[in-house]
Every structure is written in C-alpha cells, then in structure tokens.
Image (cartoon, helix red, strand yellow):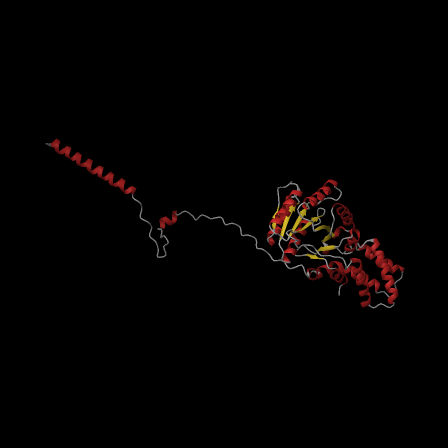
C-alpha cells in the first residue's frame, strides 16, 4: 500500500512539472504588447527603453545646386568701371596735359612728351606720329588754355585708337547655327577666366551659352570652366585629360547646334608662341570646327602688363588663325594703357574686350571714348 501511494505522488509531481515547463514555453513565444502612444500618435517609451534606444541615423543630404546668377548687361560696363581704369591710367593723362600746358614748348619739351608716350607702351612709331600731329595743332591754335589742350589731346588719342573700327562682338546665332567664339592665347594671360567672364557678358545680354573645355592638357582648366558655367547655368562640354582638343571643340559645337544654343565659346590650351607643333594644333582645332559651323570670332587674350612682348606673341597667333579681336586683360594693373594703340596697330584688328579687375563682371566691351576720358580724368 505504501508503495502505491509513493508511485501516485511521483506521477503527480511529473505532471505538475510538465505543465509548468509547457506554460513557460508558451509565454516566451508571445509578442510583447505595443508601447503606449501619446495623443499625437508618438510612441511613449519607459525610462529603461529610452536609455537603450538606438541613436537616430543621419540621412545624407544631396548638396544644393548652385544658385544661377544673372550678370549685368554689357552696355555701359566700361563706364561703370571707369574709376578703376582711371586709377591706373590717370598718371599718363596728367603728364601729357601738364607738358602740353607749358608756356613754351621747345624741342626738349616735345621729346619729353614723346618719351612719356613710349613709356606708356604706345610704341615708337605711333608716339612720333602723335607728337608730330600735336605740334601742328599747337602752331595753329597759338595760345592754349587747359580746355583746348584737353580737347586737342583727346582728339589725337581717339584718332590713334580708331573710333571707326567695328568692335562688335559677334555672339548672335545665324540660321540654325550658334555663333562660335574661339579663345586663344599663351599661358598666364587669363584666357580661361576670360572665357568664363565672357559667358557672363553674353548671358547678361539675354543669350544662352555653351562652353567647350578644349584645354585638355590642364585638368584644372576644365574644372575652372565648369565652375564659371555653373554660376550662369551654361553647359560645359569636357573630356578626359589628354583628349584631342579638336574632338572636344567639335563635340561642343555639335551639342550647341543640337541644343539651339546662341553662342558656343571654345577655350583652348595656353600655347607658347615658339612651339610650332602646338600652334599647328591650334589651326587644326579651327579647321575641325569649320566642318560643321563657321568660327565667328577668334579672340586673342593678351596680358596688358607684358607690354611689347605681348606684341611678339600676337604676331605669331595672327599667322596661324585669323584673329578678329583682342581681349586685353589686367589693364587695371598697369599704367601702360598705350598698349591698346600698339597692339591694334601691330595686328590691324581692334581691341574688343578689356579686363579691369578680378571680379566676375570686370570684363567689359572696349569703348574708346570712355577709355580716353578715364586717361585724361575730369
């Protein structure tokens, strides 16, 4: 009997133990109730849950597109920059006016006037011609007051600059083709920067622009051009460093035609005028472009601070490509404004653009009258 009671007790204990483990296993499989939420639907966490909650993950934000700028129009730019031009060129005007206002103008005084002009990079031949013309006018006038002297000098300088020359920059499309501007020059003259600033001038006049980065020898040139283009919403055609520049120029014009762009500006590598192979390559770039569109302008960029050395560069470029205009940069950094007269006389083509500072809108169409007024001052 005792053995029977013991057996029954063991069975009961086994059943109870099995039931306990069964209930525990079911509890583990249950899903925890959702956290309480606030009235606004936000989950309310316990203090322990707040302490162990994972930190928020930062979602990368795409960089904002650069804001498109609207540059000022080309009209009146040189007048607005006259004060800057006056600071560098006014010494020339004051010297000439002071010399011409002397009571007696002997041979020594006229030689001093000629030396002043030569020092300002006018060139020996033009300086001599100016002096000869002024001597004749002084004899005719007789007595000279400051107003007469200023008017006489202004007339002579304007005559040397050539007020009748066509300085129009051809940027308007013709037919179904854009205007094509080829920008050339040696290293260090500010050629790529001039391309970017010229794009701003054209956009400011209400036209569309496409830039061709055909300077494939210098990766920084294409990056620089890309930056200029993005600021005014101009597309830039570029290829890998070392690519044939002619192929980039060809593709830029092709895309300009397809996109009905008003103006295509092609930047070329800065070439030493003594390197025959590179100069021949520049001629190739122009010929390749002309297979699908005419080149409306070939702008030679010259550094005004290089003086007469810039003229030697200009001669060689003019032999390779038909230069149609000069962009004279850094004119605010030199007192030798006579280089405008000298370079025009040397090439027989007009200065069409002048750079008067490092600001994005410091490139201006050249206006002879405003230029002379800045030299002579008030």
- The quarter in which the C terminus is drawn is bottom right
- The quarter in which the N terminus is drawn is top left
Q: Answer above or below: position of 219 versus 329.
A: above
**Name of the residue lying farthest toward the front:** 175
* Residue 235 in view in this figure: yes
Where residue 37 appears, x then y in whole percent? 34, 53
Where residue 13 appears, x then y in whole percent? 19, 36
318 lies left or right of 261 = right
Tell me the residue at 36%/48% (across/down): 49
Tell me the residue at 86%/59% (across/down): 132
Q: How many marks?
A: 0
Where residue 17 appears, x then y in whole percent? 22, 37
Front residue of 33/349: it is 349
**Name of the residue lying farthest toward the right:** 107
345 lies left or right of 213 = right
Where residue 86 appears, x then y in whole percent? 73, 60
* Residue 217 in view in this figure: no
Front residue of 106/134: it is 134
Q: Quadrant of residue 41?
A: bottom left
């Amino acid at each position: 009997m005792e053995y029977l009671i013991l057996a029954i007790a063991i069975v009961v204990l086994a059943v109870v133990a099995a039931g306990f483990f069964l209930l525990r296993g079911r509890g583990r499989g249950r899903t925890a109730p959702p956290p309480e939420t606030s009235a606004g639907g936000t989950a309310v966490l316990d203090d322990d849950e707040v302490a162990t909650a994972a930190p928020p993950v930062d979602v990368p934000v795409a960089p904002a597109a650069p804001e498109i700028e609207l540059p000022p129009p080309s009209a009146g730019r040189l007048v607005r920059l006259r004060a800057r031009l006056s600071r560098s060129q006014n010494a020339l005007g004051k010297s000439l006016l002071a010399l011409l206002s002397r009571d007696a103008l002997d041979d020594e005084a006229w030689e001093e006037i000629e030396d002043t002009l030569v020092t300002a990079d006018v060139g020996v031949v033009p300086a001599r011609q100016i002096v000869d013309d002024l001597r004749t006018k002084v004899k005719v006038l007789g007595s000279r007051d400051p107003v007469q002297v200023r008017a006489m000098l202004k007339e002579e300088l304007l005559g040397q600059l050539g007020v009748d020359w066509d300085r129009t920059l051809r940027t308007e499309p013709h037919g179904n083709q854009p205007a094509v501007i080829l920008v050339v020059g040696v290293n260090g003259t500010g050629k790529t920067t001039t391309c970017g600033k010229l794009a701003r001038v054209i956009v400011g006049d209400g036209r569309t622009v496409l830039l061709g980065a055909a300077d494939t020898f210098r990766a920084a040139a294409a990056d620089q051009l890309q930056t200029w283009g993005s600021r005014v919403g101009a597309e830039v055609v570029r290829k890998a460093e070392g690519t044939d520049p002619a192929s980039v120029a060809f593709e830029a014009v092709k895309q300009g035609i397809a996109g009905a762009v008003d103006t295509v500006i092609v930047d070329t590598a800065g070439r030493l005028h003594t390197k025959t192979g590179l100069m021949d390559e520049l001629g190739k770039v122009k010929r390749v472009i002309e297979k699908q569109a005419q080149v409306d302008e070939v702008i030679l960029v010259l550094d005004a601070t290089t003086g007469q050395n810039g003229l030697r560069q200009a001669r060689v470029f003019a032999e390779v490509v038909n230069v149609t205009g000069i962009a004279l940069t850094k004119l605010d950094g030199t007192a030798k404004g006579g280089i405008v007269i000298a370079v025009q006389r040397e090439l027989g083509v007009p200065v069409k653009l002048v750079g008067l500072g490092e600001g994005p809108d410091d490139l201006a169409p050249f206006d002879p009258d405003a230029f002379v007024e800045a030299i002579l001052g008030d």
